[in-house]
Image: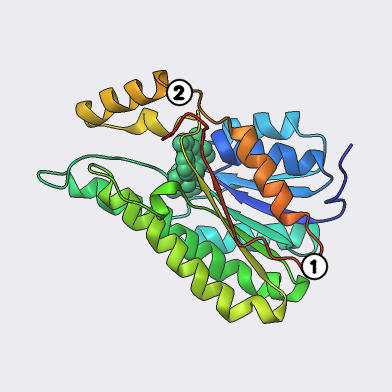
Amino acid sequence: MDRSLQGKVVLVTGASSGIGEATALALSEAGANVAVGARRADRLADLEKRAPGEVLTLDLDVTDEQSTRAAVSATVERFGGLDVLVNNAGLMLNGSILGADTTEWARMVHTNLLGTMYTTHAALPHLLQRKGTVVQISSTSGRQASAGGGVYAATKFGVNAFSEALRKEVTTRGVRVVVIEPGMVATELLSHLTDPTMQAAARDMMSAMRLLQSADIAKAVLYAISQPEHVAVNEILIRPTDQA
Ligand code: NDP
């Protein structure tokens, strides 16, 4: 069994489903003490029961800066420090720009972009102390934008830009920054779509290919954070083989 993270402390945002949940479980299996944050407390309680290691469940809304600060503080208080932050919380509400419900734009920017920034800001002093790692769950949409995905892509391009600046600021102080860019993964992400055209397009794409599973992304996270200190895996692009 891989126990490469024995004694390490990890905070995963958006761990109540999908990629975050799978990552929290994989890192727990690898020996980490894992703090898991999200808004659905029942799902986190269930995760805590299934994880083999120590788990701290946190009521976390990443759009609320105070909530991100409280989550980081509670993690450090419980486990004595922080080695890895996985910024995973996110949502995708795709639709055309013309006629869009702009409250959906604000939700994506607040969650995917500002949420990632707030949590990173709160965690960074602790990560500097331990020469830790920030893992950003970005997307292929952080590298290319498609029609209907303009705002989601803007948030993920933003995450990538923020991450590259952060890397330049902290890498020589021992903090590594990893950007993971998944293609389509079978999770609840698409279930939040409200635009019927986007819902139909998503259904078509999903039935036309073998999707990635959340565990595939969790493995990429584990790979990146298990490297020796002098190795910085800065970016992993991972798509379903069937995704052209
Ligand atoms: P899910 O919908 O399954 O998971 C999203 C997670 O984010 C949930 O745990 C949800 O928890 C959490 N979340 C949403 N809003 C907030 C908030 N305000 N505060 C705290 N947590 C929040 O989707 P995925 O697992 O697919 O998504 C995880 C990440 O992966 C996202 O950043 C997404 O953009 C990215 N991604 C996904 C891809 C895919 O194809 N599925 C492809 C590329 C990237 P709760 O609602 O309980 O708060």
Going from N to C along the chain, the mark reached first, 2 or 1, is 2
| Distance between the alpha carbons at the discs numbered 2 and 1 | 37 Å
Residue 221 in view, yes or no:
yes
Depicted 98 relative to depicted 173: above or below: above
Amino acid residing under circle 1: Glu
Which mark, by number, is residue 135?
none
User: In what element is the residue under mark 1?
Assistant: loop
Q: Position of residue 142 (x, y in %)?
A: 41, 54
Residue 87, image quadrant: bottom right
Residue drawn at x 74%, y 29% as measured from the top left: 50
Task: Tell me: 143 left or right of 225.
Answer: left
Residue 121, image quadrant: bottom right
Circle 2 Cα neighbour tier, 10 Å, few/some/many (<14 / 14–19 / ≥20)? some
Q: How is the image coloured?
A: rainbow
Q: Residue 64 or 184: which is nearer the viewer?
A: 184
User: In what element is the residue under mark 2?
Assistant: loop
Residue that badge 1 annotates: 229
Amino acid residing under circle 2: Met
Depicted 111 relative to depicted 218: above or below: below
Residue that badge 2 annotates: 209
Residue 99, image quadrant: top left
The label nearer to you, 2 versus 1, is: 2
